[in-house]
Image (spheres, rainbow, N blue to C red):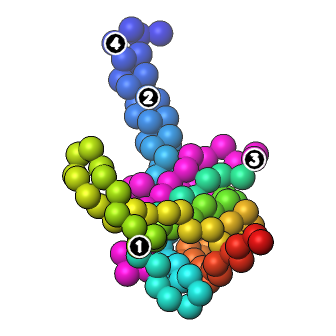
Amino acid sequence: MNRNNVGPGIFYCVCVVVTIGCGQADRRLAVTGSVALDGKTLSRAIINFRPVPGNPSSSAGAGLEDGNFKISANQGLFPGDYNVIIQAFEETGRMVVDPQFGKVPETALVRFQEEKTLQVTVSEESENRFDFQITRARSAR
């Protein structure tokens, strides 16, 4: 075997492996949608998609603007099943003192009935738009 031909052959093999590996890493998909609480758009909220047990993917999330969210493909999700966690905040009507900002409106976490049941499947064959209609949890008495 001629030693001068080994270097280009190894270089070619490395390029093929890197190209194939990079193609698989680009399987992240954009995810979009909206969230409404009791029929009204939800603005002061964040949405997070967490992989279900057995799905080795990572989480991704976004803030809501006028009830809508968008996670771009470069920050997106791999195909699979995800639990959806939505956290919303609303003003309580009281003012509190923040050490950094002074007097500010107090906010509280909004609880809703679907809190533990939201799940989606992200797929290469679909648009991956998810619109959630959630309802406020009834307070315990």
Amino acid carrying label 1: it is Gly
Amino acid carrying label 2: it is Val
Looking at marks 4 and 1 on the same chain, the residue that comes earlier in the sequence is marked by: 4
How far, Cα to Cα, is label 2 from label 3?
34 Å
Above or below 122: residue 25: above
- Which residue is label 4 attached to? 4
Amino acid carrying label 3: it is Pro
Looking at marks 2 and 3 on the same chain, the residue that comes earlier in the sequence is marked by: 2
Query: Residue at 75% across / 47% down in the picture?
Result: 53
- Which residue is label 3 attached to? 53
Q: Confirm whether residue 122 shows in the render.
A: no
Instruction: Name the residue at the left extreme.
Output: 101
Q: Confirm whether residue 51 shows in the render.
A: yes
Query: Residue at 45% across / 70% down in the picture?
Result: 92
Looking at marks 3 and 4 on the same chain, the residue that comes earlier in the sequence is marked by: 4
- Which residue is label 1 attached to? 93
Looking at marks 3 and 1 on the same chain, the residue that comes earlier in the sequence is marked by: 3
Task: State the extent of the magenta-drawn residues as a range.
Answer: 53-79
How far, Cα to Cα, is label 3 from label 4?
50 Å
- What mark, if any, has residue 14 been given in the picture? 2
How far, Cα to Cα, is label 4 from label 1?
78 Å
Viewer-side label of 2, 3 = 3
Above or below 113: residue 23: above
Q: Is residue 68 magenta?
A: yes
Residue 126 at what x, y percent from top left?
A: 59, 76
Instruction: Name the residue at the bottom extreme.
Output: 39
Residue 100 at what x, y percent from top left?
A: 23, 46
Residue 86's quadrant in the figure?
Answer: bottom right
From the viewer's perspective, is 24 left or right of 11? right
Above or below 16: residue 39: below
